Image (cartoon, helix red, strand yellow):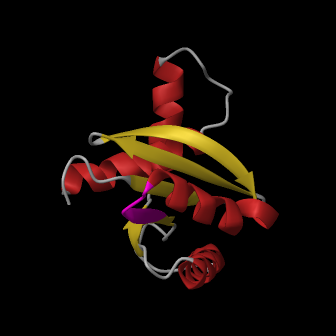
């Protein structure tokens, strides 16, 4: 993948799905979706923006084991993959992304704001940095 490749980052939550996008290797928070609309809206974003790959944050415990939430994320990604089978979906360890997002907001003087949108961007940026 090149710097011009387009990626989506997803932070799946119990009620909402936070989406981040990339541009020239930089991730930024994009949109918050309800559970009921997430798969169709993401499929539309993929088509409209010529997305090359989707990075889904995988919530594992600090010891690396999986939880009910991990299984819910895998199920969501499976449904998303069934809707847009031509797009590669990968999982990325999201441990500590929320803590990192809280730190970013605190440093920006924006404590108390939702950190989930920032977490989606952090998950995606960590993946992009690994390439």
Q: Is residue 77 above or below residue 50?
A: below
Q: Is residue 126 above or below residue 80?
A: above
- The picture places residue 66, in percent across and down from the top left corner, at 51, 80
**Residue 12 visible in the shown view:** no
Quadrant housing the C terminus: bottom left
Residue found at the far top of this picture: 109
Image point (59%, 76%), residue name: 80
- The picture places residue 25, in percent across and down from the top left corner, at 27, 42
Q: Is residue 55 magenta?
A: yes
**Residue 7 visible in the shown view:** yes
Q: Looking at the image, how many numbered discs can be counted on the residues?
A: 0
Q: Is residue 101 above or below residue 105?
A: below
- The picture places residue 78, in percent across and down from the top left corner, at 57, 83
Q: Quadrant of residue 39?
A: bottom right
Q: Is residue 15 magenta?
A: no
Image point (67%, 59%), residue name: 41
Q: Is residue 2 left or right of residue 110?
A: left
Image point (49%, 70%), residue name: 61
Q: Is residue 62 left or right of residue 14?
A: left
- The picture places residue 44, in percent across and down from the top left corner, at 61, 60
Quadrant housing the N terminus: bottom left
Residue span colored magenta: 50-56
Task: Compare residues 105 and 20 and report the one nearer the observer.
Answer: 20
Q: Is residue 126 left or right of residue 42?
A: left
Q: Is residue 42 left or right of residue 131?
A: right
């Amino acid at each position: 993948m090149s710097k011009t490749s387009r990626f989506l980052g997803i932070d799946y939550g119990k009620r909402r799905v936070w989406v981040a996008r990339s541009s020239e290797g930089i991730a930024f928070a994009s949109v918050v979706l309800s559970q009921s609309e997430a798969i169709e809206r993401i499929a539309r974003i993929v088509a409209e923006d010529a997305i090359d790959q989707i990075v889904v944050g995988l919530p594992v415990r600090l010891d690396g084991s999986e939880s009910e939430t991990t299984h819910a994320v895998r199920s969501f990604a499976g449904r998303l993959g069934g809707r847009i089978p031509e797009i590669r979906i990968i999982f990325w360890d999201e441990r500590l992304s929320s803590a990192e997002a809280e730190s970013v907001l605190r440093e920006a003087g924006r404590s108390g704001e939702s950190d989930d949108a920032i977490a989606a961007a952090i998950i995606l940026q960590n993946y992009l940095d690994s390439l």
